[in-house]
Protein backbone atom coordinates (compact mmCIF):
# COMPACT_ATOMS: atom_id res chain seq x y z
CA UNK A 1 0.00 0.00 0.00
CA UNK A 2 1.30 3.44 -0.91
CA UNK A 3 -0.30 6.41 0.86
CA UNK A 4 0.04 10.16 0.52
CA UNK A 5 -0.82 12.33 3.52
CA UNK A 6 -1.56 15.99 2.84
CA UNK A 7 -1.74 18.07 6.00
CA UNK A 8 -1.10 21.71 6.89
CA UNK A 9 0.97 20.65 9.92
CA UNK A 10 3.33 17.78 10.66
CA UNK A 11 5.92 17.19 13.32
CA UNK A 12 7.87 19.02 14.60
CA UNK A 13 5.18 21.72 14.21
CA UNK A 14 4.22 21.37 17.88
CA UNK A 15 2.70 24.86 18.02
CA UNK A 16 -0.46 23.35 16.52
CA UNK A 17 -1.02 21.02 19.47
CA UNK A 18 -2.28 17.45 19.17
CA UNK A 19 -2.89 17.03 15.40
CA UNK A 20 0.82 16.92 14.37
CA UNK A 21 1.38 14.10 16.87
CA UNK A 22 -1.76 12.20 15.80
CA UNK A 23 -0.90 12.43 12.11
CA UNK A 24 2.80 11.62 12.42
CA UNK A 25 2.36 8.66 14.79
CA UNK A 26 -0.34 7.23 12.55
CA UNK A 27 1.99 7.39 9.54
CA UNK A 28 4.94 5.95 11.47
CA UNK A 29 2.99 3.03 12.95
CA UNK A 30 1.48 2.06 9.60
CA UNK A 31 4.96 2.17 8.06
CA UNK A 32 6.64 0.25 10.88
CA UNK A 33 3.98 -2.40 11.47
CA UNK A 34 2.59 -2.94 7.97
CA UNK A 35 5.65 -1.91 5.89
CA UNK A 36 3.51 0.55 3.94
CA UNK A 37 5.14 3.41 2.04
CA UNK A 38 3.85 6.75 3.25
CA UNK A 39 4.81 10.20 1.99
CA UNK A 40 3.66 13.48 3.49
CA UNK A 41 3.10 16.89 1.93
CA UNK A 42 2.89 19.61 4.56
CA UNK A 43 3.84 23.21 5.26
CA UNK A 44 7.13 24.57 6.52
CA UNK A 45 5.32 26.23 9.37
CA UNK A 46 5.21 26.21 13.16
CA UNK A 47 2.80 28.89 14.31
CA UNK A 48 3.84 32.02 12.43
CA UNK A 49 7.44 30.86 11.97
CA UNK A 50 9.05 28.43 9.51
CA UNK A 51 10.39 25.11 10.76
CA UNK A 52 13.37 25.33 8.41
CA UNK A 53 15.13 28.39 7.00
CA UNK A 54 14.56 27.71 3.33
CA UNK A 55 12.36 29.44 0.77
CA UNK A 56 11.97 26.29 -1.37
CA UNK A 57 10.58 22.82 -0.67
CA UNK A 58 12.46 21.06 2.14
CA UNK A 59 12.53 17.25 1.98
CA UNK A 60 13.23 15.26 5.16
CA UNK A 61 13.17 11.59 6.18
CA UNK A 62 11.29 11.63 9.49
CA UNK A 63 11.21 8.20 11.15
CA UNK A 64 11.02 6.46 7.77
CA UNK A 65 8.41 8.86 6.37
CA UNK A 66 9.39 11.07 3.43
CA UNK A 67 8.10 14.54 4.25
CA UNK A 68 7.88 17.47 1.84
CA UNK A 69 7.77 20.77 3.76
CA UNK A 70 6.35 23.40 1.39
CA UNK A 71 6.89 27.16 1.77
CA UNK A 72 3.85 28.81 3.33
CA UNK A 73 2.06 31.79 1.82
CA UNK A 74 0.51 34.01 4.47
CA UNK A 75 -3.05 35.14 3.74
CA UNK A 76 -5.32 37.79 5.28
CA UNK A 77 -7.25 35.04 7.09
CA UNK A 78 -5.84 33.50 10.27
CA UNK A 79 -4.74 29.90 9.73
CA UNK A 80 -5.98 29.85 6.14
CA UNK A 81 -3.12 27.58 5.11
CA UNK A 82 -1.85 27.88 1.56
CA UNK A 83 1.21 27.11 -0.56
CA UNK A 84 1.45 27.78 -4.27
CA UNK A 85 3.88 24.83 -4.47
CA UNK A 86 1.16 22.29 -3.67
CA UNK A 87 -0.18 22.13 -7.21
CA UNK A 88 3.26 21.03 -8.44
CA UNK A 89 2.45 17.59 -7.01
CA UNK A 90 -0.62 17.06 -9.22
CA UNK A 91 1.16 14.65 -11.57
CA UNK A 92 2.51 12.40 -8.80
CA UNK A 93 -0.80 11.78 -6.99
CA UNK A 94 -1.79 9.11 -9.50
CA UNK A 95 1.02 6.87 -8.21
CA UNK A 96 -0.57 6.54 -4.75
CA UNK A 97 -3.30 4.10 -3.73
CA UNK A 98 -5.00 6.54 -1.34
CA UNK A 99 -4.63 10.22 -0.47
CA UNK A 100 -5.38 11.04 3.17
CA UNK A 101 -6.19 14.73 3.72
CA UNK A 102 -6.17 16.26 7.18
CA UNK A 103 -8.19 19.33 8.16
CA UNK A 104 -10.85 21.50 6.52
CA UNK A 105 -11.59 25.19 6.05
CA UNK A 106 -8.24 26.04 4.51
CA UNK A 107 -6.90 26.31 0.97
CA UNK A 108 -4.24 23.62 1.50
CA UNK A 109 -6.80 20.91 2.26
CA UNK A 110 -9.32 22.16 -0.30
CA UNK A 111 -6.76 22.13 -3.13
CA UNK A 112 -5.58 18.68 -2.02
CA UNK A 113 -9.13 17.30 -2.32
CA UNK A 114 -9.49 18.81 -5.78
CA UNK A 115 -6.14 17.35 -6.85
CA UNK A 116 -7.14 13.86 -5.68
CA UNK A 117 -10.46 14.10 -7.54
CA UNK A 118 -8.71 15.24 -10.71
CA UNK A 119 -6.21 12.37 -10.48
CA UNK A 120 -8.99 9.83 -9.89
CA UNK A 121 -7.41 8.65 -6.64
CA UNK A 122 -9.72 7.95 -3.66
CA UNK A 123 -9.22 10.30 -0.73
CA UNK A 124 -10.00 10.08 2.96
CA UNK A 125 -10.76 13.27 4.87
CA UNK A 126 -10.05 13.62 8.59
CA UNK A 127 -11.51 16.93 9.86
CA UNK A 128 -9.88 16.74 13.35
CA UNK A 129 -12.98 18.16 15.02
CA UNK A 130 -13.23 21.18 12.73
CA UNK A 131 -16.75 20.25 11.61
CA UNK A 132 -17.97 20.34 15.20
CA UNK A 133 -20.88 22.76 15.62
CA UNK A 134 -19.06 24.79 18.29
CA UNK A 135 -15.99 25.19 16.08
CA UNK A 136 -18.18 26.34 13.23
CA UNK A 137 -19.31 29.35 15.29
CA UNK A 138 -15.85 30.87 14.94
CA UNK A 139 -15.54 33.02 11.79
CA UNK A 140 -19.01 31.85 10.85
CA UNK A 141 -19.31 33.99 7.73
CA UNK A 142 -16.05 32.83 6.19
CA UNK A 143 -16.69 29.19 7.10
CA UNK A 144 -20.24 29.29 5.75
CA UNK A 145 -19.00 30.67 2.43
CA UNK A 146 -16.15 28.15 2.31
CA UNK A 147 -18.56 25.31 3.09
CA UNK A 148 -21.04 26.48 0.48
CA UNK A 149 -18.44 26.81 -2.28
CA UNK A 150 -16.07 23.96 -1.50
CA UNK A 151 -16.38 21.80 1.60
CA UNK A 152 -19.87 20.37 1.13
CA UNK A 153 -18.98 19.04 -2.33
CA UNK A 154 -15.58 17.75 -1.25
CA UNK A 155 -16.90 16.02 1.88
CA UNK A 156 -19.53 14.27 -0.24
CA UNK A 157 -16.83 13.10 -2.65
CA UNK A 158 -14.53 11.73 0.05
CA UNK A 159 -14.22 7.94 -0.03
CA UNK A 160 -14.43 8.14 3.76
CA UNK A 161 -14.81 10.92 6.29
CA UNK A 162 -12.72 9.67 9.19
CA UNK A 163 -13.97 10.69 12.65
CA UNK A 164 -12.24 9.67 15.86
CA UNK A 165 -15.11 9.28 18.34
CA UNK A 166 -18.86 8.69 18.24
CA UNK A 167 -19.28 12.07 19.95
CA UNK A 168 -17.38 13.79 17.15
CA UNK A 169 -19.73 12.22 14.60
CA UNK A 170 -22.83 13.25 16.55
CA UNK A 171 -21.55 16.81 17.05
CA UNK A 172 -20.39 17.39 13.46
CA UNK A 173 -22.20 19.05 10.58
CA UNK A 174 -21.96 16.60 7.70
CA UNK A 175 -23.84 16.08 4.42
CA UNK A 176 -26.33 13.22 4.71
CA UNK A 177 -24.49 11.37 1.95
CA UNK A 178 -21.08 11.52 3.65
CA UNK A 179 -19.50 8.07 4.03
CA UNK A 180 -18.29 8.24 7.63
CA UNK A 181 -16.15 5.87 9.66
CA UNK A 182 -15.24 6.15 13.36
CA UNK A 183 -11.79 4.96 14.47
CA UNK A 184 -9.75 6.47 17.33
CA UNK A 185 -6.42 8.05 16.49
CA UNK A 186 -3.64 5.53 15.90
CA UNK A 187 -1.31 6.57 18.71
CA UNK A 188 0.99 4.40 20.78
CA UNK A 189 -0.04 4.90 24.40
CA UNK A 190 1.80 2.85 27.02
CA UNK A 191 -0.10 2.96 30.28
CA UNK A 192 2.38 2.88 33.15
CA UNK A 193 2.48 0.08 35.68
CA UNK A 194 4.50 2.13 38.17
CA UNK A 195 1.51 4.03 39.47
CA UNK A 196 1.72 7.77 39.97
CA UNK A 197 2.84 8.77 43.45
CA UNK A 198 2.01 12.10 45.05
CA UNK A 199 4.95 14.29 46.02
CA UNK A 200 5.35 14.00 49.79
CA UNK A 201 6.38 17.63 50.27
CA UNK A 202 3.04 18.86 48.87
CA UNK A 203 0.80 16.16 50.33
CA UNK A 204 -1.64 18.77 51.66
CA UNK A 205 -2.18 20.21 48.17
CA UNK A 206 -4.10 19.04 45.12
CA UNK A 207 -1.99 20.06 42.15
CA UNK A 208 -3.95 20.59 38.93
CA UNK A 209 -2.41 21.16 35.51
CA UNK A 210 -3.57 22.46 32.14
CA UNK A 211 -1.51 21.74 29.01
CA UNK A 212 -2.66 23.13 25.69
CA UNK A 213 -3.15 26.19 23.58
CA UNK A 214 -4.13 29.24 25.60
CA UNK A 215 -7.28 30.39 23.81
CA UNK A 216 -10.95 31.10 24.50
CA UNK A 217 -12.09 27.62 23.46
CA UNK A 218 -10.17 25.99 26.31
CA UNK A 219 -12.40 27.65 28.92
CA UNK A 220 -9.53 28.76 31.16
CA UNK A 221 -11.29 31.97 32.18
CA UNK A 222 -14.31 29.98 33.34
CA UNK A 223 -12.07 27.67 35.37
CA UNK A 224 -10.30 30.60 37.04
CA UNK A 225 -13.64 32.19 37.88
CA UNK A 226 -14.75 28.87 39.38
CA UNK A 227 -11.67 28.85 41.62
CA UNK A 228 -12.65 32.32 42.87
CA UNK A 229 -15.94 30.83 44.13
CA UNK A 230 -14.16 28.40 46.48
CA UNK A 231 -13.95 29.00 50.21
CA UNK A 232 -10.58 30.24 51.49
CA UNK A 233 -9.77 26.91 53.15
CA UNK A 234 -10.47 25.17 49.83
CA UNK A 235 -8.26 27.57 47.90
CA UNK A 236 -5.42 26.82 50.30
CA UNK A 237 -5.48 23.19 49.16
CA UNK A 238 -5.29 24.00 45.44
CA UNK A 239 -2.50 24.68 42.95
CA UNK A 240 -3.33 25.24 39.29
CA UNK A 241 -0.51 25.57 36.75
CA UNK A 242 -0.94 26.45 33.07
CA UNK A 243 1.37 25.35 30.25
CA UNK A 244 0.88 26.29 26.61
CA UNK A 245 1.37 28.77 23.79
CA UNK A 246 -0.56 32.02 23.69
CA UNK A 247 -3.17 32.26 20.92
CA UNK A 248 -5.09 35.39 19.96
CA UNK A 249 -3.38 37.15 22.89
CA UNK A 250 -5.72 35.27 25.23
CA UNK A 251 -3.01 34.93 27.87
CA UNK A 252 -3.43 38.62 28.68
CA UNK A 253 -7.09 38.02 29.57
CA UNK A 254 -6.10 35.00 31.68
CA UNK A 255 -3.50 36.97 33.61
CA UNK A 256 -5.99 39.79 34.13
CA UNK A 257 -8.49 37.29 35.60
CA UNK A 258 -5.82 35.91 37.96
CA UNK A 259 -5.19 39.44 39.25
CA UNK A 260 -8.89 40.32 39.36
CA UNK A 261 -9.70 37.39 41.64
CA UNK A 262 -6.39 37.69 43.56
CA UNK A 263 -5.35 34.15 42.75
CA UNK A 264 -1.63 34.80 42.15
CA UNK A 265 -0.70 32.27 44.85
CA UNK A 266 -2.87 29.58 43.27
CA UNK A 267 -2.80 30.02 39.48
CA UNK A 268 0.50 30.31 37.59
CA UNK A 269 1.35 30.39 33.89
CA UNK A 270 4.51 28.26 33.42
CA UNK A 271 5.17 28.68 29.66
CA UNK A 272 5.24 26.29 26.70
CA UNK A 273 6.13 22.59 26.92
CA UNK A 274 7.80 20.55 24.19
CA UNK A 275 6.35 17.03 23.72
CA UNK A 276 9.39 15.39 25.30
CA UNK A 277 8.90 17.50 28.43
CA UNK A 278 5.24 16.73 28.97
CA UNK A 279 5.49 13.34 30.67
CA UNK A 280 8.13 14.50 33.12
CA UNK A 281 6.03 17.53 34.07
CA UNK A 282 2.74 15.60 34.25
CA UNK A 283 4.15 13.30 36.92
CA UNK A 284 4.36 16.26 39.29
CA UNK A 285 0.58 16.76 39.32
CA UNK A 286 -2.50 15.03 40.71
CA UNK A 287 -5.25 16.07 38.25
CA UNK A 288 -5.20 17.23 34.62
CA UNK A 289 -7.77 19.90 33.69
CA UNK A 290 -9.52 20.34 30.35
CA UNK A 291 -12.80 22.10 31.03
CA UNK A 292 -13.29 23.49 27.53
CA UNK A 293 -16.07 24.48 25.15
CA UNK A 294 -15.06 21.90 22.54
CA UNK A 295 -12.32 19.31 22.20
CA UNK A 296 -12.25 16.71 19.47
CA UNK A 297 -10.18 13.93 21.03
CA UNK A 298 -8.14 15.45 23.83
CA UNK A 299 -4.64 14.04 23.39
CA UNK A 300 -3.56 15.61 26.68
CA UNK A 301 -6.40 13.75 28.41
CA UNK A 302 -5.00 10.42 27.27
CA UNK A 303 -1.40 11.46 27.88
CA UNK A 304 -2.37 12.19 31.47
CA UNK A 305 -4.21 8.91 31.91
CA UNK A 306 -1.19 7.17 30.41
CA UNK A 307 0.71 8.45 33.45
CA UNK A 308 -2.16 7.43 35.76
CA UNK A 309 -3.16 11.05 36.32
CA UNK A 310 -6.97 11.38 36.54
CA UNK A 311 -8.68 14.08 34.48
CA UNK A 312 -11.15 16.86 35.20
CA UNK A 313 -12.92 17.59 31.90
CA UNK A 314 -16.03 19.24 30.52
CA UNK A 315 -18.85 17.38 28.83
CA UNK A 316 -17.67 18.92 25.55
CA UNK A 317 -14.54 16.73 25.33
CA UNK A 318 -15.35 13.95 22.91
CA UNK A 319 -13.72 11.18 24.99
CA UNK A 320 -16.07 11.83 27.90
CA UNK A 321 -17.82 8.47 27.33
CA UNK A 322 -14.56 6.67 28.07
CA UNK A 323 -13.97 8.74 31.21
CA UNK A 324 -17.46 7.85 32.45
CA UNK A 325 -17.22 4.20 31.50
CA UNK A 326 -13.89 3.57 33.22
CA UNK A 327 -14.31 6.08 36.07
CA UNK A 328 -10.96 7.76 35.56
CA UNK A 329 -11.88 11.37 36.22
CA UNK A 330 -14.55 13.97 36.78
CA UNK A 331 -16.91 15.55 34.23
CA UNK A 332 -18.58 18.94 34.48
CA UNK A 333 -20.74 21.21 32.35
CA UNK A 334 -19.24 24.55 31.33
CA UNK A 335 -21.31 26.48 33.87
CA UNK A 336 -18.96 28.20 36.30
CA UNK A 337 -21.01 27.09 39.31
CA UNK A 338 -20.90 23.44 38.21
CA UNK A 339 -17.13 23.60 37.66
CA UNK A 340 -16.73 25.02 41.17
CA UNK A 341 -18.95 22.33 42.73
CA UNK A 342 -17.03 19.56 40.97
CA UNK A 343 -13.78 21.12 42.14
CA UNK A 344 -15.07 21.12 45.71
CA UNK A 345 -15.82 17.40 45.39
CA UNK A 346 -12.28 16.70 44.20
CA UNK A 347 -10.78 18.68 47.08
CA UNK A 348 -12.76 16.50 49.52
CA UNK A 349 -11.14 13.35 48.11
CA UNK A 350 -8.23 11.69 49.85
CA UNK A 351 -4.93 11.33 47.96
CA UNK A 352 -5.65 7.62 47.54
CA UNK A 353 -9.13 8.25 46.09
CA UNK A 354 -7.72 10.72 43.57
CA UNK A 355 -4.89 8.37 42.61
CA UNK A 356 -7.30 5.44 42.16
CA UNK A 357 -9.20 7.37 39.49
CA UNK A 358 -5.99 7.51 37.49
CA UNK A 359 -5.26 3.83 38.00
CA UNK A 360 -8.68 2.99 36.52
CA UNK A 361 -7.37 4.14 33.13
CA UNK A 362 -5.53 0.82 32.74
CA UNK A 363 -8.74 -0.79 31.47
CA UNK A 364 -9.48 2.11 29.12
CA UNK A 365 -6.22 1.58 27.24
CA UNK A 366 -6.68 -2.19 27.16
CA UNK A 367 -10.21 -2.03 25.75
CA UNK A 368 -10.43 1.16 23.67
CA UNK A 369 -6.94 2.01 22.38
CA UNK A 370 -5.40 -1.38 21.73
CA UNK A 371 -2.74 -0.70 19.11
CA UNK A 372 -3.05 -4.08 17.36
CA UNK A 373 -6.82 -3.74 17.04
CA UNK A 374 -6.53 -0.18 15.74
CA UNK A 375 -3.90 -1.17 13.18
CA UNK A 376 -6.27 -3.70 11.72
CA UNK A 377 -9.11 -1.17 11.63
CA UNK A 378 -6.95 1.34 9.74
CA UNK A 379 -5.72 -1.39 7.39
CA UNK A 380 -9.31 -2.37 6.66
CA UNK A 381 -10.33 1.26 6.06
CA UNK A 382 -7.57 1.94 3.53
CA UNK A 383 -8.03 -1.37 1.74
CA UNK A 384 -11.81 -0.92 1.46
CA UNK A 385 -11.26 2.49 -0.12
CA UNK A 386 -8.90 1.02 -2.73
CA UNK A 387 -11.31 -1.78 -3.57
CA UNK A 388 -14.15 0.74 -3.83
Image (spheres, rainbow, N blue to C red):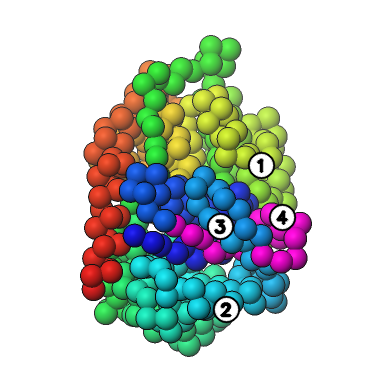
Task: Identify the residue at image location x=55%, y=48%.
Answer: 62
Q: Which residue is mark 1?
A: 272
State whether residue 256 is above or below residue 110. above
Q: Nearer the viewer, mark 1 or mark 4?
A: 4
Which residue was labeled with disc 3? Answer: 67
Task: Say which quadrant the N terminus sits in.
Answer: bottom left
List x then y, in percent, for residue 365: 31, 36
Q: Which residue is mark 4?
A: 52
- Residue 40 shows in the view: yes
Q: CA distance from mark 2 to mark 1?
A: 35 Å
Q: CA distance from mark 4 to mark 2?
A: 21 Å
In the picture of the structure, the residue carrying the numbered disc 2 is: 87
If you read the primary sequence from the N terminus, does the residue marked by circle 1 or circle 4 appear first?
4
Q: Look at 50% across and 78% down and name the residue there.
A: 91
* Mark 4: secondary structure: loop
Q: Nearer the N terminus, badge 4 or badge 2?
A: 4
Amino acid sequence: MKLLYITPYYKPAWYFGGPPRCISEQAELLHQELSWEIDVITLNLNGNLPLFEDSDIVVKNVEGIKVFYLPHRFTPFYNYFYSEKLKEFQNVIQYYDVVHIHGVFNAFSKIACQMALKAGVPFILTPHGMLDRWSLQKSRGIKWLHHLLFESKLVRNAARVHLTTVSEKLNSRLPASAKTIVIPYLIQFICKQDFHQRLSEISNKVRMIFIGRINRKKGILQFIEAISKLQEYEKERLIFDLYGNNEENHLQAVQHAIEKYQLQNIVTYKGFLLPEERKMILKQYDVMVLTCFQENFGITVLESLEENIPVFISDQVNVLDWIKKYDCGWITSMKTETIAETMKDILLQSPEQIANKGINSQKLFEKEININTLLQEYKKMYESVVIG
